[in-house]
Amino acid sequence: MEEAGIDSAALEKRMIDLEVKSAYADDLLDQLNRTVFRQQQQIESLARELLALRQQLAAGATPGLDAAADERPPHY
């Protein structure tokens, strides 16, 4: 049956093409969501590290160094 110049085979092909595109779009959206989630975790981790460094600086400590780093090496 032909309706408005489009036969059923062409209509079915268009539907299949749209379903395939939709499946790819869903997959891409899932990948992007996972990426954004991981990036948010990294941002939160970096923000915690930055806060800790700021607190160390405010307390007068040297960031990244502990008391053992201030000791003289054993060869002196």
Image (cartoon, rainbow, N blue to C red):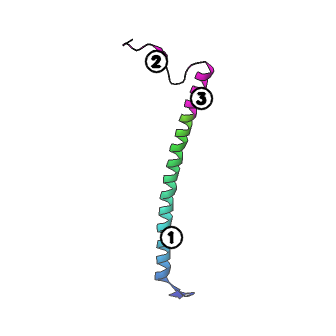
Mark 3 surroundings within 10 Å by alpha-carbon count, few (fewer than 14), some (14 through 19), many (20 or more): few
Farthest right residue in view: 58
Label 3 sits on residue? 51
The disc placed on residue 69 is 2
Q: Is residue 73 above or below residue 36?
A: above
**Amino acid type, callout 2:** Ala
Mark 2 surroundings within 10 Å by alpha-carbon count, few (fewer than 14), some (14 through 19), many (20 or more): few
**Which quadrant holds the C terminus?**
top left
Q: Secondary structure at mark 1?
A: helix
Whether residues under marks 3 and 1 lie with C-beta atoms below 8 angstroms apart, the answer is: no
The front one of 73 and 63 is: 73
C-alpha span from label 2 to label 3: 22 Å
Foreground disc of the pair 2, 3: 2
Label 1 sits on residue? 18
Q: Is residue 71 above or below residue 16?
A: above
**Amino acid type, callout 3:** Leu
| Magenta span of residues | 47-76
Residue 34 location (% of width, % of height): 50, 48
The front one of 75 and 13 is: 75
In the rendered structure, the answer to whether residue 30 lies left or right of residue 73 reads right
Q: Secondary structure at mark 3?
A: helix
